[in-house]
Amino acid sequence: MSLAHWLQRLWEKGVLHLHKLLYHSKEELQLSNETLQALLVIEEKMATAGDKGIPVVGLTRHIADSIAHLKKSNIIEVECEEGRAFISFTPLFARLLQSKGGHSELGKQYLQMYEEIQEEMGRLEDVRNRQVFERNQLHEERKAMLEKEERLHTWEKELRKKEKEIQEEQKELIQEEKKLQEKALHLGEEKLLLEKERNDLNNLRQELKEVKAYLDQQSATRNRSSVVIPLFEQEESQLLQIATFLQQQRGQAANKEEIREIEKLQQRYRWSLEFTLRFLNLAFKQGHRSVIEYRRQAEMVYQRGIETIEKLEEYFNKKSFFDEKISEVWVTLGSSIRINDIFIDMYKKWSQTWGFSHEVILRACQETYKGAQNPNLNYVDAILTRWRQAGVRTVQEGEREIEKFKQQRNRNYQRNKATIATSSPLSGENVVPKNEEEAKAYERFRHL
């Protein structure tokens, strides 16, 4: 590449300005002012057009004539392509170098400098490209790291959510396991009862066979079609009447063990024969056929202090599932009192007015039985009042309140270091009423 072409490249890059060069080399080039002015106008047009070239259509006649004159004078080079003119000042730069005393030695120096500059520019361009590449690479890596961090954050949230779900499932599994254990225990008890009933049934079948054989023998010797024969001829008169009554009611004979259990019930509750037979009749009408069911119904009758047949009939006519629940409360308290209207009203207040479930009420009764020397309804009512204020609705919430109450009581004991009075609630006895209102409330339940 010649030195003139190198100067042209510098001009194209904007490093070299033509008007300065012409100003300092006006005498060496021996150009007229008109020619210099035309060159400056053409330079301005080239700078405005850039790499696209000067549109030929838009040129004025004066400028077009100037371009043609300068080309003819070998001051510029002109190439036209697709209606655009591309102008080079290489001939002008060559004339300038020639006017400076030749360019043999100076041109070599300039050319060497140009090559070194080009080499340095190439190296700098490579460095710049490498920096751009590394910057883009770092940007991509940073972007990937941010995406990875976001994914890790999302995974961490999902993992915490999954851990929480697993904990909930474990709690549910523990609860289900407890229920299954309770159910297994209940099934075991039922299995024992079924085994006992199966043995009773086998004994009953054997006795029926003996009775049938005996009846067949009697019918063969006597001409009677139907005879009611006592099953236990050697027993006392009352037991025979009970056995005959059960046989008539159930349509099947009663075994000795059943008769013995009913006799125990009669003796325990001191019932007359008439009362006992009426009890069996009413219990049978409500679907109770086994001795276990008779025992349960007899206990419920005893709890309510029923001693006359009229009261017995009234009770069985009005009896509902509600009575079963009240009896469970009575049994849980281990109380020796009778179930009366106050007892029933209190249970209705707990279950219907306050909205406690039967299981929650039983749990309060169990806590009363364990914590009081004399379990009574007042103590249960105090526990349920405290639970109602705490918003307890399930047995689990009641357990937490019990534990919280125990911890509070222990803290108070450690803080005060005082001896508990024998009449305080912690000792299981009712406290002395603080005012007239409490005294009236205690008086209401005094006989319980």
Image (cartoon, rainbow, N blue to C red):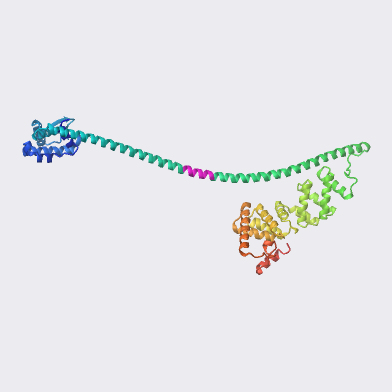
Q: Quadrant of the C terminus?
A: bottom right
Residue 345 horizontal/vertical position (percent): 69, 59
- Where residue 373 appears, as percent x and y from the top left, is 72, 60
Q: Nearer the viewer, residue 93 or 383?
A: 93
Q: Residue at x 70, y 66 (%)?
A: 443
Provide the major secondary structure of the magenta segment. Answer: helix
- Which corner quadrant holds the N terminus? top left
View extreme (bottom): residue: 436
Q: Is residue 383 left or right of 117 when viewed as pictured?
A: right
Picture quadrant where residue 103 is located: top left
| Depth order, front residue of 58/79 | 79
Q: Quadrant of residue 52?
A: top left
Can residue 161 be found in the magenta stretch?
yes
- Outermost residue toward the right in this view: 221
Most foreground residue, 445 or 94: 94
What x and y, as percent, mark residue 15?
18, 39
Residue stretch in magenta: 154-163
